[in-house]
Image (cartoon, rainbow, N blue to C red):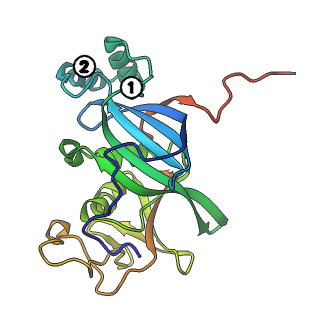
């Protein structure tokens, strides 16, 4: 069990996951750290081991550097993220229907129940991620997870993580919000994550007992446990995030009209 870091897994998310049917659940936008405007579409799946799939595309495509410059200049002049999104979408006539757009990332996740101080709570557990290699080093996964806190109260790490997946949590997610370390076998929180992949109380959530020295080299200088870190997960909550990211333009869970009697 995770988070023993593994070499890789067999989930192939370079294509949309197999399912019996899919239904568009939510659509939102954000301005990425490199000033791409990203369109994020959440799908509810049936007949799949995953309840949700999130697809991510770049408004206007990857090669439109002038759109990045447009977003950057607007925000640099004091404009809001929502205004920058509207500006870029208007510049290319983007109508919010990105079903056929080229996707630069895809994430699958499912509901996950855990025990909080106030009783049982539920969030989503990331079960797989595909990020186009040219985008991996541009904080895309971290930014997307931060955005998902608009739609889900808690984001929980996968229970099988590659070095890349673990680094998103050990380094990137602590810039999104307070990351708590959770023992799923004992059903309680054990520490709060800080820089270096270690808790403020000294707890080390990851081990690499399944990897050799070369395979774990990209994890350095983050900390590792010398004992199996079975059933240890990382959780970030919407109430603990530092900044809200992005906007929502469609949510099938919220009625468009309310009838007043």
| Residue 142 drawn at (x, y percent) | 34, 49
Label 2: state its secondary structure: helix
Q: Earlier in the sequence, mark 1 or mark 2?
A: 2
On residue 72, the disc is: none
What residue is at 22 percent from the left and 44 percent from the top?
138
How would you rate the neighbour count of disc 1 (Cα within 10 Å): few for under 14, some for 14-19, many for 20 or more? few
Q: Residue at x 25, y 75 (%)?
A: 223
Foreground residue among 4 and 147: 4
Q: Is residue 67 above or below residue 226?
A: above
Classify residue 8 as left or right of residue 214: right
Horizontal and vertical percent position of residue 257 = 71, 22
Secondary structure at numbered mark 1: loop
- Say how many tags the image has: 2
Residue 149 drawn at (x, y percent): 49, 46
- 17 lies left or right of 71: right
Which numbered disc, 1 or 2, marks the residue closer to the eye?
A: 2
Looking at the image, the residue that sits furthest to the left is 214
State the residue in front, 178 or 182.
182
Quadrant location, the C terminus: top right
Residue 140: % across, % down? 30, 44
Which quarter of the rendering shows the N terminus? bottom left
Please say if 143 is above or below 87. below
Q: In the rendered image, which quarter is residue 4 located in?
A: bottom left
Query: Residue at horizontal 30%, vertical 25%?
Result: 75
Q: Which residue is mark 2?
A: 70
Q: Residue at x 27, y 82 (%)?
A: 209
Where 36 sits versus 8, above or below? above
Disc 1 marks which residue? 80
Compared across the picture, whether 226 is left or right of 98 comes to: left
């Amino acid at each position: 069990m995770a988070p023993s870091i593994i070499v890789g897994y067999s989930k192939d998310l370079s294509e949309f996951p197999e399912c019996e049917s899919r239904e568009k659940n939510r659509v939102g936008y954000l301005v990425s750290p490199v000033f791409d405007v990203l369109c994020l579409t959440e799908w509810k799946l049936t007949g799949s081991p995953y309840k949700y799939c999130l697809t991510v595309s770049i408004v206007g495509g990857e090669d439109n550097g002038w759109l990045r410059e447009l977003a950057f200049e607007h925000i640099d002049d004091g404009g809001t993220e929502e205004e920058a999104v509207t500006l870029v979408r208007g510049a290319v006539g983007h109508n919010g229907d990105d079903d056929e757009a080229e996707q630069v990332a895809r994430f699958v996740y499912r509901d996950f129940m855990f025990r909080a101080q106030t009783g049982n709570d539920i969030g989503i557990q990331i079960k797989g991620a595909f990020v186009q290699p040219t985008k991996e080093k541009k904080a895309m996964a971290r930014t997307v997870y931060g955005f998902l806190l608009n739609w889900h109260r808690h984001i929980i790490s996968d229970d099988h993580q590659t070095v890349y997946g673990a680094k998103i949590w050990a380094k990137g997610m602590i810039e999104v919000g307070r990351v708590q370390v959770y023992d799923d076998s004992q059903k309680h929180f054990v520490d709060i994550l800080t820089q270096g992949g270690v808790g403020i109380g000294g707890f080390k959530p990851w081990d690499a007992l399944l990897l050799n020295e070369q395979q774990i080299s990209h994890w350095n200088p983050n900390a590792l446990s010398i004992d199996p870190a079975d059933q240890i997960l990382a959780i970030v909550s919407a109430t603990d995030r530092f900044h809200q990211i992005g906007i929502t333009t469609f949510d099938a869970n919220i009625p468009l009209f309310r009838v007043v009697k």
